[in-house]
Image (cartoon, helix red, strand yellow):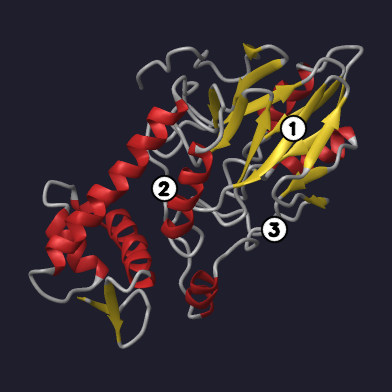
Amino acid sequence: MQNQTGLDPRPGHPQEVAPDVRCILAPNPSPMTLHGTNTYIIGGTDLAVIDPGPDHADHLKAILAAVGPHQQITHILVTHAHVDHSPLSRALSQATGAPVLAFGDAVAGRSPVMQQLAAQGLAGGGEGVDRDFVPDQCLPHGAIVSGSGWTLEAVWTPGHFGNHLCFGFNDILFSGDLVMGWASSLVSPPDGDLSDFMASCIALRRRNDRLYLSGHGAPVNDPRARLDWLIAHRRRREADILRALAEGPATAETLARRIYTDTAALLLPAAARNVFAHLIDLAGKSTVRAEPEMSWHARFHLG
């Protein structure tokens, strides 16, 4: 793997990434997580932990070892309920007595169309949902969480996941998996929603955050430029799908084969999930229609 500029790629080693912010890398590298999950510790006396990460004993030890003799973990915050972000929150809460705070459980924040698809039996495409995740306290959009010397603002940003929160801290945004510098965010229905993703990106662009600290990879030093790229990337993919549909009605899987002609067969299922996310968004804008109804197996037509 390439080194991630600006962060120590060794798991378990706390690194200061901003004033009163340290990052500890979890030992869960993969094609979906790069070097692993970034766990952030905020504060000097009362500490907040953002995204404890996967249920891994060594990572729990590393987080607890980063707590000094005159410090205590008072809050545990989770950006979203994927298995590389939330499961360790339970063990960390048991070890420290700190409550777990998040937008809601693993199905919170889903749009009506995603609720409908889930009711039909559509499940995630293998991204790994922490289905047992339930926070001790739910944070609505705009909620404020404070400790000694720090204040965090909860910013509800569904798209990658329905219960996804970012957290504002001074001029820094902990952007979870919604905005990362090393890869575009995965959007896989019914947990991911492209309509929500685009709306969240546009909403974040109206903020004035100087720096994004994301769930994986290095800090994002030019947030607006990265948001502009993500929005343009999705709009280009939408145009590809519409051109492919001009060849005739098709399912998401058929469209993926038409569009991703240079993609290895092993990666086509993920590509099809991405196409399906776009088709749901396009149907919501009445640009395409699904027959006989919106579902994974539907055939999509222009108009």
Q: Position of residue 263 (x, y in %)?
A: 17, 47
Q: Secondary structure at mark 3?
A: loop
Q: Are marks 3 and 1 in contact (CB under 8 Å)?
A: no
Amino acid carrying label 1: it is Leu
Amino acid carrying label 2: it is Leu
Q: In terms of image quadrants, where is residue 281?
A: bottom left
Please give the name of the residue rendered at 31% of the width and 48% of the height, measured from the top-left corner: 234
> Which label lies toward us, 3 or 1?
1
Residue that carries the numbered disc 3 in the rendered image:
105
Q: Which mark is residue 186?
A: 2
Between discs 3 and 1, the one toward the N terminus: 3
- Vertical placement of 156 versus 148: above or below? below
Between discs 1 and 2, the one toward the N terminus: 1
Crowding at dot 3, Cα within 10 Å, few <14 / some 14-19 / many 20+, comes out as some
Please give the name of the residue rendered at 40% of the width and 15% of the height, measured from the top-left corner: 3
Query: For this view, does 276 lie left or right of residue 179?
Result: left
Please give the name of the residue rendered at 65% of the width and 43% of the height, measured from the top-left corner: 155
> Which label lies toward us, 1 or 2?
1
- Vertical placement of 89 versus 240: above or below? above
